[in-house]
Amino acid sequence: MTAPGMIQEQLPVAMAPWSPGAGPAGLVIIDAVHGFCTAGAGPLAPAAPSPQVSRMIREIDDLARRFTAAGRPLLAFLDTHEPGRPEPPYPPHCERGSGHEELVDELAWLEGEPLATLIRKDCINGFVGAIEPAHPGHGVTHNRVVDWIALNRLRSIVVTGICTDICVLDFVVTMLSARNHGLLSTLRDIVVLEPACATYDLPLETARHLDLPDGAAHPQALTHHLGLYLMASRGAVLASEIQD
Ligand SMILES: [Zn+2]
């Protein structure tokens, strides 16, 4: 049995079509920017076009168009860093002004979409990256995700993007805690649309070939699965498709 087959058998994830029904639903898109999705766009971009990433972008574009047609709100995170300010343990990426911090071409239309809220973030966890001063200079903060959920009275969110086991995972598990803590009083379902998520591929042999430590290994199929497993185990709903 292959390793992905074995992990699916030992750590199974179940997913099914999901429908938001009549309740207000929002779409969250995480880091669909060149620096993570477009081959050659910096050190954290795929070395070559990735079928999993291409599928993700098609699925996000399709769902984003359906949500906007239905008048539903969207929130897109864009990983963006000030040049010279590192984000350890990662090499410099998505630096402001490089173009790598911009939405992929297929989703660039979101910038002019009134239903879309764009949030630039400089850390893995979008929930943390959405914290900003409420009154500059006074130390009081607010959270733009919490505000977005409350203002739109969202009953459910569908989360998509990259990487399944990094930025998507951290955001989703944090939202589950925030919901259970009562910060998101209208929110019930936190849904992850599997085909609209992706992660990067760095097999162990490639890591060794690049003189990276073995711990840098990150095989795409396994880590994508692991991310899904961890989110589901914390209470996220895994969806194979979104039905209207
Ligand atoms: Zn970053």
Image (cartoon, rainbow, N blue to C red):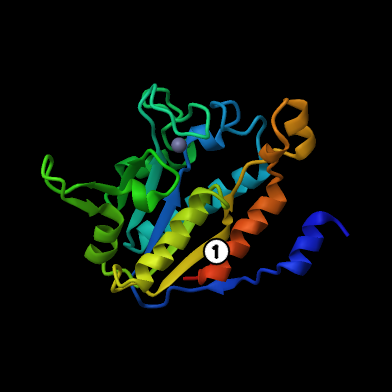
Nearer to the camera, 61 or 176: 176
Amino acid of disc 1: Met
Number of callouts in the render?
Answer: 1
Q: Where does the image place residue 179, in percent across and percent down from the top left?
A: 36, 70
Q: Where does the image place residue 80, in percent across and percent down from the top left?
A: 39, 34
* Image-quarter location of ligand 1: top left
| Quadrant including the N terminus | bottom right
- Classify 27 as above or below 220: below
**Measuring 77% from the left and 27% from the top, which residue is drawn there?**
209
> Is residue 237 in view?
no
Q: Name which quarter of the figure residue 28 lies in.
A: bottom left
- Classify 132 as above or below 173: above
Q: Name which quarter of the figure residue 46 lies in.
A: top right
Disc 1 designates what residue? 231
**Measuring 31% from the left and 49% from the top, which residue is drawn there?**
130
**Measuring 44% from the left and 51% from the top, which residue is drawn there?**
29
Q: Is residue 18 left or right of residue 29?
A: right
> Is residue 30 in view?
yes
**Measuring 76% from the left and 61% from the top, which residue is drawn there?**
7
Graded by Cα atoms within 10 Å as few (under 14), some (14 to 19) or many (20 or more), the crowding at tag 1 reads: many
Nearer to the camera, 216 or 81: 216
Q: Where does the image place residue 4, in percent across and percent down from the top left?
A: 77, 57
Q: Is residue 155 left or right of residue 61?
A: left
Disc 1 residue lies near ligand 1 with CB under 8 A = no
In the structure shown, which secondary structural element does the residue marked by tag 1 occupy?
helix
Nearer to the camera, 80 or 131: 131
Q: Residue furthest bottom?
A: 22
Q: Residue furthest right?
A: 1
Q: Is residue 5 left or right of residue 102?
A: right
Q: Where does the image place residue 12, in percent across and percent down from the top left?
A: 70, 69
Nearer to the camera, 236 or 182: 182
